Amino acid sequence: MSAPGIDPLVRAPVAAADMLIRDARVLDPRAGHDARHDVLVRGGEIAQIGEAGGIEAPAGAEIVEARGRNLFPAFVDPHVHLRTPGQEYKEDLETGTRAAAAGGFCCVVAMPNTDPVVDSASVLRSLRDAAARDARVPVGFMPAITKGLGGLELTEMAELRAGGALGFTDDGRPVVSAGMLRRALQYQRLCGGVLALHEEDPALSAGGAMHEGRVSALLGVAGIPSISESSMVARDAEIAGYEDGRVHMQHLSCVASVDAVAAAKAAGWKVTAEASPHHLCLTEEAVRGLDTRMKMNPPLRTETDRQALIDGLRSGIIDCVATDHAPHARDEKEVPFEQAPMGTTGLETSFAVLHTELVLPGVLDLATLVERMTSGAALLDLPTPRILPGEPANLCLVDPAAEWVVGEDGYESRSENCSFAGRTLRGRVLLTIAAGAVAYRERGFAVSAAPEPEGAGA
Amino acid sequence: MNHLLSIEDLDRHAIERICDRAASFAEAQERDIKKVPALRGRTVLNLFYEASTRTRSSFELAAKRLSADVVSFVASGSSVEKGESLKDTVLTLSAHRPDAIVIRCPWAGAPALLPRWTDAAIVNAGDGKHEHPTQALLDVYTLRRRLGSLSGANIWIVGDVLHSRVARSNILAFRAMGAKVTLAGPPTLMPRDVQEAFGVEVRTTLDDLREADVVYALRMQHERMQEAYVPSLREYASVYQIDGRRLGPRQLLMHPGPVNRGVELSGDVVDSPQSLILEQVAAGVVVRMAVLYEVLASARTGEPAPEPQTA
C-alpha cells in the first residue's frame, strides 16, 4: 500500500498569517541558518528571508519586532496524550493543542489509549472530524497495534492507514508477545506506518511505581527495574531487524536501552528512539518526597541513566525529543503515590526545560536541541518544518532570556500535573505559527500592523 | 514536633527526648491509677485502613491513659469501601475537629498528605512498606533500657526486609542512635541497592550472626511463598530461623510481633530470657503516650513540649 491518500494531519480552519518578523536570530540547522534576519510570511508561507531590517512590511501585514529573540522552526511532538475520546476531563483536542501551541509546537501526534481505544476506522474518523473542529495546531493520530490494546489481535491496520493513521502504537502498554509484534511487523509491509513501542516487560515491572534502586529501597515502594525496559528494547529491535520492519522506541529511560538502540542502528536496523524532557532533566531523587507529579512510566531513573540519555540525544542515537504529555485531573493525582496514575504534562514546558537544564549550562547546543525537537516529523514520514522560502510557515519565536515560573500563571492544558511545576525556567515561547496560521501569542506580547498605504481601498 | 511522619525527620536528640518522656510515663504506669490528665479534653482519632489489633489498641490505650477522648475509624466496611478517596475521608473526619489523627494505611507517604486537608497533628502508624516510626521508637526505648546506650551496638535485622516498614524505620532509628546495622535475609527479599540507601551491611546467611549484640527478627508472611520469593517455609526456617542453636547466650532477641513460632523464631528462643518481645509490647503504650503528648502539647507552639504533670 502506498502513502495514505488523505492528509494524516488535521486541524480547525484558520486564517493564513501575513507577518513580518523583524531582526530575529533565525536558527534552523537544517536550512543552514544561524544569523539575524527578517522573515516575511505571506498567505501562510515563508515568502522571503532577508537581511535584518532589510524587508519592507507589505500593506496589512503584522510586524513583529524580534530583536534579541530566536526564531526556530516550530517543534514536532510525536508522542502526546490528548485524552479524547472519553477522558475529556483530563484534556481535549482544544486544550491539548492550545498547550502544544504555547510550547512552540506546530504538530503533535496523539496516542490511542483513550476510551474507546482508537483501534477502528470509525473511531479514527470521528476523532479526525473532532480535530477538524477543535485542534489549534495540526494533529496526527496513531491508532492501536492490537485491538483494545489487548495484545492479542491486530487492528485493521490497512483500513486505518487509508483513513489517515500516521503509524501504530499500543502506547501505555507493551506488545508483550514477541510473536504478535512479529506479525504486526510483517503486516507493516502491506500498510506501512511506523510501529511506536512502549517497551516494558510486565513480568519484571508489575506492581512497581518508581525506579527500582536506592530511592525505592529507602521508601519501600515497589520498583520498576530498568531491565524491564531495556530487555524489551533489545528484543524488539532484533525482531524488527529480522523482519526488516520499522520501529520507534518510545520514551527511553535507561543506559541499557540507549545501548540497545545504538547496537540496533549499528546493525543497520530501522530503529529510531525518543526521550522525554523529564527523563533528560530529572532523576529518582525527585521522587524522594513521593510527589505524584513525579510518577510516570517509565519512571525517573538514576543520574547515570540521565547522562546516557543526554549523550544519546547529543549523538543522535536518540533521534528526537517527545514530551509524552500525559494530563491527569487534580483529583486523580491528589492521592497517595502508589495509587496515583502515571504521567506528567510536558507540552508547555519542554523547550524551556531543556533550554534551561541542558543548553544554558553548555551540555547541549541550541542548534542540536532545535534539531531534536523537530526531527520527530521525519520519523513519522511528515514534512520537517524548515525556515526556507516557499515552505509553509511553521515558526516559533522565543525570548531566550525571559524567566518564568512553571504554573504561576496557570496552564493552557486542562490539567496541572507538571513535574516541573514551581521551577524557574529561562526561555519563553512568544509566538507560534503552525502550518501557516498563528496558533499562539504570549499574553502581552505586542505586535503592530504595518500602516495601510495611503489611498489604498477599504 | 507537629507530626510524626517518618523517623527520617528525627535526629538522635529528638528520639532521646521521646524515650525520656516515655520513661517518665512508665513510672506512672506502675501506680494503681495509671491515667494522667495531660491531654484532657483533646480528641485522638485512629484512622486504620489495615487490620491491626495490636497497634490500634496500643494507640487507644496510650490516648486513654493521657485522658484524651479516642475515636477509632476502621476503614473496612465503611465509606472507603464505597469508593471515598483518602482526601474526602480525611476532610469528613476532620469536620469533627480531632486534635490528632493516627493513621495506618497500605500506601507509602499517605500520612504526609494529611496536613493538606486537616489541622490535626498526624501520627504515622505504618504506611505501606515505607515506615512504622512508633515501632522504631519503642524498639529504641526497649533497647536503651536494656543496654543503656545503642552507641556501637551491633544490630542484625533478619528476614523479609523488602516488604517491611518496621525494617526501614528501625534501620534509620538504630543508626541515628549510633548503632551498626546489618541486614540478613533471602536475596529475593532484600531491596536492590539497600546498602547504598541506608549505609548498612547485607548478608545472605546467618553464618556470622554471632557478631550481633541484638538480633531483630522480622515476621515472615505466608503470602511470600505463593509469590515465589522463597520456595517453602521449611527451607526459609532451615536457613533463617533464629533458634537456640544460632542465638548466642549473650545476644538479645527482638521481634515486632505477631510471631510465627517455628518459622522466623523457634519456640524456645521466644520464651527465653534473652527475648525482649513482651517488653517491646509494654513499651508500645508508653512510647505512644510520649508521641501523642509530643505532637499535641507542642503542635501549636512549635516549642518542645513542656514536662507533663504525671503526679
Image (cartoon, coloured by chain):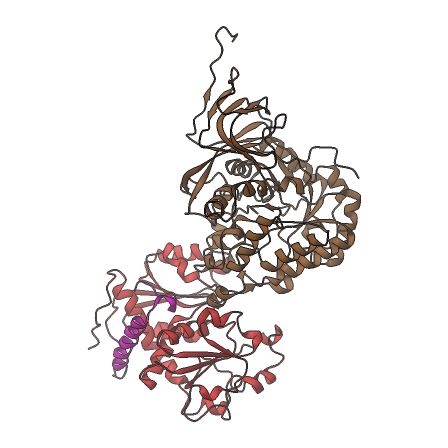
Question: With respect to residue A337, does B265 lie above or below?
Answer: below
Question: With respect to residue B137, does A353 lie above or below?
Answer: above
Between B101 and B203, which is closer to the camera in this rendering?
A: B203
Q: Which chain is red?
A: B
Q: Residue B237: where, in percent of width, then height?
A: 56, 85
> How many marks do you count on the picture?
0
Q: Main secondary structure of the magenta part?
A: helix
Q: Quadrant location of residue A296? A: bottom right
Between B252 and A149, which is closer to the camera in this rendering?
A: B252
Stretch of the chain drawn in magenta = B1-30
Q: Residue B303: where, in percent of width, then height?
A: 23, 63
Q: In which quadrant is the N terminus of chain A drawn?
A: top right
Question: With respect to residue A443, does A175 lie above or below?
Answer: below
Q: What residue is shown at x 49% (from left), y 12% (from top)?
A: A452
User: Does the image show residue B219?
Assistant: no
Q: Residue A417: where, in percent of width, then height?
A: 48, 48
Q: Is residue B305 magenta?
A: no
Give the colour chain A carries in the figure: brown
B18 left or right of B108? left
Q: Quadrant location of residue B238? A: bottom right
Question: With respect to residue B246, does B108 lie above or below?
Answer: above
Q: Is residue B10 magenta?
A: yes
Q: Residue B197: where, in percent of width, then height?
A: 46, 69
Between B119 and A341, which is closer to the camera in this rendering?
A: A341
User: Does the image show residue A110?
Assistant: yes
B135 left or right of B27? right
